[in-house]
Image (tube, rainbow, N blue to C red):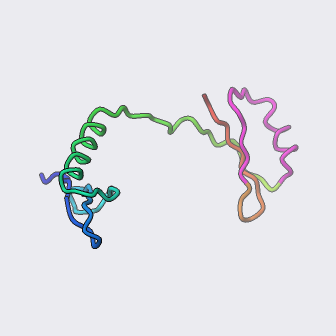
Amino acid sequence: MSEGKFELYADRSGKFRFRIKSADGQVIYESDAYPTREDCLEGIKVMKHIVCQAPIEDRTEQVRYLMSSMKPMEIMLETLKPIDLDGEIIAQKNQNGSITLYEVVK
């Protein structure tokens, strides 16, 4: 099975950059410019270290959908009163004029 790779190259201005490509060749990260090839190689080394050491922060359960409605927000909040809410409630106004409420769970 093929793996992703770091690709080092010189840009049009003569500066050095690297990109990270997935196994299927898709660019998933592109670096800033480095003045020298050696600096760019050091940037790759630092990126490898950071990526290998980085913890996974799962934020998928930190925002919970509550409801979406065309009703005024005050009425929506009254509807939510019987529900046990632990976090902050945030509102998003949608293009159709409705409001969606979410709870930020800490």
**Quadrant of residue 27 in the image?**
bottom left
Residue at horizontal 29%, vertical 71%? 13
Q: Residue furthest front?
A: 35
Q: Is residue 76 left or right of residue 45?
A: right
Magenta stretch in the rendered image: 71-92
Q: Nearer the viewer, residue 47 or 77?
A: 47
**Image quadrant where one finds the C terminus:** top right
Percent from the top left, x then y, of residue 100? 71, 50
Residue 59 percent location from the top left of the image: 50, 37
Q: Quadrant of residue 31?
A: bottom left
**Front one among 41 and 57:** 41
**28 on left or right of 96:** left
Q: In the rendered structure, does residue 90 fall within the stretch colored magenta?
A: yes
Question: Count of labels shown?
Answer: 0
Q: Is residue 7 magenta?
A: no
Where 61 sits versus 7, above or below? above
Q: Position of residue 18 (x, y in %)?
A: 25, 57
Q: Quadrant of residue 17?
A: bottom left
**Position of residue 15 measured from the top left corner of the image (x, y, whole percent):** 27, 64
Q: Quick check: 53 above or below 21?
A: above
The residue positioned 78% from the left and 62% from the top of the image is 97
Q: Residue furthest bottom?
A: 12
For this view, does 32 lie left or right of residue 63?
left
Residue in view at x 73 percent, y 47 percent? 91
Q: Residue at x 22, y 61 (%)?
A: 24
Q: Residue furthest left?
A: 1
